Image: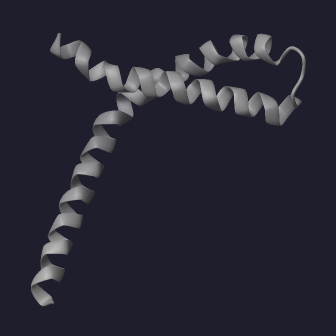
């Protein structure tokens, strides 16, 4: 079960981001057309196929970067508090 847990966040992030971005790009490219929903339902799975593996690969790196920035932020706040 632990192995599956590391895929939850990337899966849902990729699902929502690919859906939102694909519909936005369709609207920008074609405007609000009558067949927007049909086109979107065709392009969203294609976008998700790229987005999910990308999110799986990038999530550990982004987590490390965020942890580092959080640590850096906390250490900077403590130094500033001592000086005041």
Rendered image quadrant of residue 28: top right
Q: Residue 32 at x, y = what percent?
A: 87, 28
Where the N terminus falls, by quadrant? top left
At x 74%, y 33%, the residue is 25
Say how many tags the image has: 0
| Horizontal arrangement in the rendering, residue 42 relative to residue 10 (left or right) | right
Q: Residue 30 at x, y = what percent?
A: 87, 29
Q: Nearer the viewer, residue 29 or 12?
A: 12
Rendered image quadrant of residue 46: top right
At x 13%, y 89%, the residue is 83
Where the C terminus falls, by quadrant? bottom left
Q: Residue 50 at x, y = what percent?
A: 54, 22
| Horizontal arrangement in the rendering, residue 43 relative to residue 26 (left or right) | left
Q: Nearer the viewer, residue 78 or 54?
A: 78
Q: Residue 15 at x, y = what percent?
A: 51, 21
At x 23%, y 57%, the residue is 70
């Amino acid at each position: 079960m632990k192995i599956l847990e590391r895929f939850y966040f990337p899966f849902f992030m990729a699902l929502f981001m690919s859906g939102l971005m694909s519909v936005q790009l369709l609207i920008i490219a074609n405007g609000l057309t009558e067949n927007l929903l049909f086109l979107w339902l065709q392009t969203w799975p294609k976008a998700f196929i790229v987005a999910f593996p990308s999110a799986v690969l990038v999530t550990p790196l982004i987590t490390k970067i965020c942890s580092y920035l959080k640590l850096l932020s906390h250490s900077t706040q403590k130094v500033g508090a001592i000086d005041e």
